Image (cartoon, coloured by chain):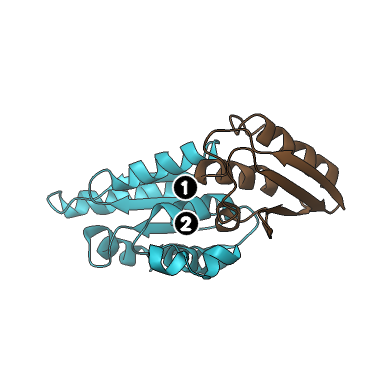
Amino acid sequence: MTQSRVAITNELGLHLRAAARLVVVANRHKAKVTLSANGKTVDGKSLLGITSLLAKKGTVVTIEADGEDETAAIEALAALIHAGFSTTS
Amino acid sequence: MVGILIATYGDIGRSLLDTAIDLAGEPAPLATTITLNDHQDRAQEWSGLVAAADTVDSGDGVLLMVDMFGSTSSTLALSLLADRNVEVLTGVNLAMVLRAMLNRKDTDLKTLSEDVLQYGRRNVTSSATWLKSGDHAQGND
């Protein structure tokens, strides 16, 4: 299992657009992905789950991935958050 | 991959699909929309719907989402069931379109249809419900 802690940098936090883009990137990987923040852990491939974290700008989110491509998944998801969700690559 | 077709009065379907694509941040292949207004010629509407369904069917079938049960779209959509691999859902909303786009890669038409139906229903809620300890707060999906 691989883990990374990333602070949300965009103004609106983990709103619907950001969550949708996280799901798109998470779905590109086989690894099971979870996101944790504010004392809650949710499925990283779940739109409702991610938005329910209510993670605002500055909130530190812990991303965990478990599976054959877990490292690539973590890197891609962390890069997306760092970029303020402006890209899905 | 299952195709997505949204059939509605006016531009509702187009707006829903465009918005879902914008939110997801990536294009949606095998997805299109059609406007079916009841002042159009019925034969023309029918052939337009058939053509649209064929456009997005790569062999895995089509999830056809329409605005309301009883609308022109739903009436025509039900006729498609007879000779095409189509599942029809009524009451299309943004959550359903997004769910269908994000979850259709490794699933079959029947499974996707049921999943999108349940997801759409769960997204029709009230603040009084989801601010309590409902599924949203639990992060379930």
Which residue: 54% across, 33% down? A11
Label the brown chain with its letter. A
- Label 1: how many Cα within 10 Å (few below 14, some 14–19, many 20+): many
| Disc 2 packing (10 Å; few <14; some 14–19; many ≥20) | many
Q: Which amino acid does the dot numbered 1 rest on?
A: Val
Camera-side residue: B105 or A2?
A2
- Parent chain of label 2: B
The picture places residue A73, in percent across and down from the top left corner, at 77, 43
Do we see residue A65 in this rendering?
yes
Residue B28: x, y in percent? 51, 41
- Counting residues from the start of the chain, the first of labels 2 and 1 encountered is 1
Residue drawn at 87 percent across, 53 percent down: A1
Q: Amino acid at mark 2?
A: Val
Q: Which mark is residue A66?
A: none
At 34% across and 64% down in the image, what residue appears?
A: B90
Relative depth, front residue between B72 and A47: A47
**Rendered colour, chain B:** cyan
- Name the residue carrying label 2: B62
| Residue B68 sits above or below residue A23 on the image | below
Kindly identify which residue carries mark 1. Answer: B56
